[in-house]
Image (cartoon, helix red, strand yellow):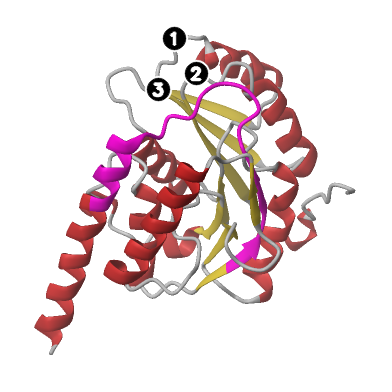
Amino acid sequence: MKTKIVDSKNNMKVVITLCTYNESENLPRMLKELRTVLPEGDILVIDDDSPDGTGEIADKMAIADAHIHVLHRKEERGLGSATLKAFQVSLEGDYDLLVNLDADFSHPARYIPELIEALQASQADVAIGSRYIQGGKIIGWPLKRHLMSRCINIWSRLFLGLKVRDCSGSYRCYRCSMLKKVDFNRFRSQGYSVQEELLYRCAQVGAKIVESPIVFEERRVGESKINMKEAFRAVYVILRCGLERFRKTNSRD
């Protein structure tokens, strides 16, 4: 498949956010692929003081490419808080679109143009790289991961009122003008549940959300950080957000 390149003629300024922890083997190749797909976009790497030197690698690549920016977090760790920090920092810039994806190649960079096209064509505020609509699929997961993912998505639709199929995937394109309406101080998530809560908070400010199919590929090197403890935390956070939603609905009635 020939890789599409994001067309800059529409004058849309795009930033890509990557949250990293021990991704030294993946990050150099990922940054090169992103630069190929999005030659004129900016890339923000948020590194949680990775002991394997991921942050130092990002710094070296940033010296060679002025469009790569790196933020090191020394005192705080966790995918949820790192993602929110990446968004807040990006929203201080003059960007039109924010694309978030993982640095482990489970989210192939080649889908970025399709996500942006889906967002623009439907005049949406969020475009999800979806594994669970026609054309999407997952490669390389054991049965346990499939069950965990399916259950958390059902749970999210039930309690958060989300109408999309893939609530838990982090591969998304957001319209920055919509994200600026979101109150990031209200977030409860510190871990993987940030993805479901992001959709919930976006929906609460009236965001239109669409899905575009992707093939999710299990990481090439390194280990997944998700575990059962993290999954139970996600269930709890989604439950609390759901109760918040029900209280709001009842108060309006």
Q: Where is residue 180 in the image (x, y as percent from the top left)?
A: 39, 59
Residue at image coords 57%, 62%: 132
Amino acid type, residue under disc 2 in the picture:
Asn
Q: Where is residue 18 in the image (x, y as percent from the top left)?
A: 53, 35
Q: Name the residue under label 1.
A: 51
Amino acid type, residue under disc 3 in the picture:
Asp
- Circles 1, 2 touching at the beta carbon (< 8 Å): yes
Q: How far apart are marks 1 and 2 (CA)?
A: 7 Å
In the image, is residue 172 part of the stretch drawn in magenta? no
Rendered view: 173 above or below 124: above
Residue placed most toward the observer, 63 or 210: 210
Q: Mark 2 points at which residue?
A: 22
1 or 2: tag closer to the N-terminus:
2
Q: Name the residue under label 3.
A: 48
2 or 3: tag closer to the N-terminus:
2
Mark 2: few/some/many CA within 10 Å (<14, 14-19, 20+): some
Mark 3: few/some/many CA within 10 Å (<14, 14-19, 20+): many
Q: Distance between the residues labelled 2 and 3?
A: 9 Å
Kindly indicate the quadrant of the structure image that contains residue 217.
top right
Rendered view: 245 above or below 32: below
Residue 97 placement, left or right of 1: left
- Secondary structure under tag 2 reads loop
Amino acid type, residue under disc 1 in the picture:
Pro
